[in-house]
Amino acid sequence: MKGLERKKELILERERYFANAVGSAVFEKPTISLWMILIPILFMHFIYRMQKFKAGRLKFDEEFMVTRRRAMDLAVETLETGVKPNMDRVVQQYGLQDSFERPYAAWMRALFDYYTDLLNANGDSFDALARSAFRSRGEFLLTLNRLSTVEKEFYAVLKPQLAATEGAAGIIATIETHSMRLRRQLADQIFA
């Protein structure tokens, strides 16, 4: 299954790039000003802010990838064993609140289908896998739009739970907006 592992890494590499790009939109990177160079204590504050920024970005990327890794592992396992998982049962194992289970299962299902299509495709790069699996920009965009839709449905259920968290609604809106934009760019790049 060496070929399957290679495809998995290509896909996860693209997903990490996607997570990093979304994280860049969510987190504002500190910038150096002339005053920081002239007044060293300000530069120390910049270093502190930069470390906090980097730690936040790493944590964001890790959390952003959790669901994607779960779905990928299920897709690989299914291709290796031939046994398709019952996504509702799988999601129940994660201990989510009842109101989250259905939208999370839909999101996992969409990711699972997406990854399974890519893992079944032929190619030695993510772009080649996507062209092989989806054959046209329109077909690829339909799949990416489905991913965006189920993610939005999950976030819609999540938003009320985070209402008391300052800035959460803005962060979710940024994630949704940039995810759509990045996915369209990806389709344009692959099917140019």
Image (spheres, helix red, strand yellow):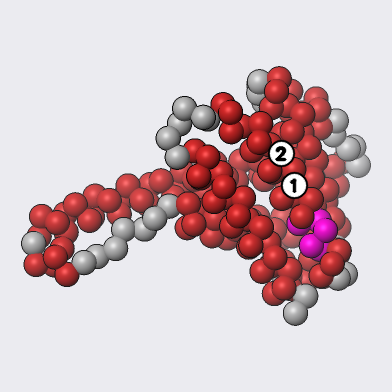
Magenta span: predominant SS is helix
Secondary structure of residue under mark 1? helix
Secondary structure of residue under mark 2? helix
Residue depicted at 51% across the width and 45% down the height: 171
Q: Which residue does the numbered mark 2 point to in the structure image?
A: 153
Count residues near mark 2 (Cα–Cα under 10 Å), then give few for <14, some for 14-19, many for 20+: some
Q: Quadrant of the N terminus?
A: bottom right
State whether residue 135 appears in this view: yes
Residue depicted at 71% across the width and 50% down the height: 148
Amino acid at the residue labelled 1: Thr
Magenta stretch encompasses residue 56: no
Image location of residue 23, percent across then percent down: 50, 53
Amino acid at the residue labelled 2: Glu
Image location of residue 169, percent across then percent down: 52, 40
State whether residue 70 appears in this view: no
The residue segment tinted magenta is 140-144
Q: Which residue does the numbered mark 1 point to in the structure image?
A: 149
Dots 2, 1 in contact, CB < 8 A: yes
Image location of residue 106, percent across then percent down: 78, 37
Residue depicted at 48% across the width and 52% down the height: 26
Left or right for 37, reference 148 = left
| Mark-to-mark CA distance, 2 and 1 | 6 Å
Q: Which mark is residue 139?
A: none
